[in-house]
Amino acid sequence: MTDRRTREKPRVHHGRVRHVERLTPHMIRVVLGGDGLAGFSAGDYTDHYVKLLFPRPGVAYPEPFDIEAIRRDFPREQWPLTRTYTVRSWDAATRELVIDFVHHGDEGLAGPWAAAARPGDVIRFLGPGGAYAPAPESGWHLLVGDESALPAIAASVERLPAGAVARVLVEVADEAEEQRLAVPDGDVQVTWVHRGERRVGAALAEAVRGLEFPEGEVQAFVHGEANFVKELRHFLRLEHQVPRERLSISGYWRLGSDEDGWQSSKGEWNRRVEEEEAARLAGVS
């Protein structure tokens, strides 16, 4: 049940767009395929992720594409930009990789790319990484996140064993952003939390705090905007005494930062969160 990051050296794959579908007003599904996925494999985890590579405008990269050579020979400001996205599903038989993108108009990099993607377009990426999957022996499962975590949560719900006990809480803008999840037989309750005009994660954290916890040991997956993730991490660790080894919890993004800024500061952010948590736990004991 321990959260462990994969250690394998990442390799570059490329996928060719086969199909694009708008799932909700702000969620776009892109299905990739082609021979460039011949060496790709995923399935151990439900939070598998890839790092999409977006070329810098005006920069010509060598062919065949070699990310190590680029990072060695090109100045850093010319390296491809990376954006991290969850693998919604991978079908080895059909060699199809599905990635869901949150899209808010021209904002960002990957969302606009997905909105403009057409069959035949090619995108390169690194990965996969991953660390979490629902443990069948867990007493119950807590799955919490905003739109950025919805693909991993949906994949995790599909992996729950028959008879599982789970509480699934997902924050989206409004009813139009809800998606149908493939819920297995058992005591699985899905709650869609509508953000409205509130800050991202405020309504979600409130809903989790008001949740009646089932009996038994919980395995929790909590991901999304860093501030509400921090709040819920302290809630689970301090108020419910959930051991770290039964938590998969991390900020996928942070309000006010793009991915480049967040990734450069994430280590320090996590260090401060852990120090604060350790101090508060010491005070409790």
Image (cartoon, helix red, strand yellow):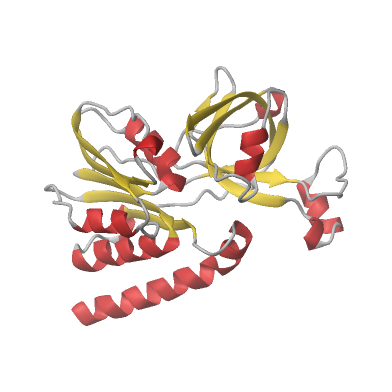
Q: How many labels does the image show?
A: 0
Name the side, left or right, on which 238 lies relative to 105. Answer: left
Q: Quadrant of residue 112?
A: top right
Residue 4, position as x, y percentages in the image:
44, 52
| Whether residue 201 can be seen here | yes
Compared across the picture, whether 121 is left or right of 200 comes to right
User: Which residue is drawn at the image coordinates 22% and 50% (left, top)?
Assistant: 218
Identity of the residue drawn at 55% across and 17% down: 93
**Res. 38 in view:** no
Q: Residue furthest front?
A: 197
Task: Name above or below for residue 279 compared with residue 120.
Answer: below
Nearest the viewer among 35 and 193 is 193
The C terminus sits in image quarter: bottom left
Quarter assignment of residue 120: top right
Q: Which of 141 and 7 is in front in this view?
A: 141
Q: Nearer the viewer, residue 207 or 72?
A: 207
Q: Position of residue 128 (x, y in %)?
A: 57, 41
- Which residue does the image show at 29% across and 58% down from the upper left? 205
Q: Is residue 173 left or right of residue 73?
A: left
The residue furthest top is 94
Residue 119 lies, in percent from the top left, at: 68, 23
Q: Position of residue 153 (x, y in %)?
A: 38, 40
Nearer to me, 24 or 186 = 24
Q: Is residue 212 above or below residue 118?
A: below
Q: Is residue 182 left or right of residue 167?
A: right
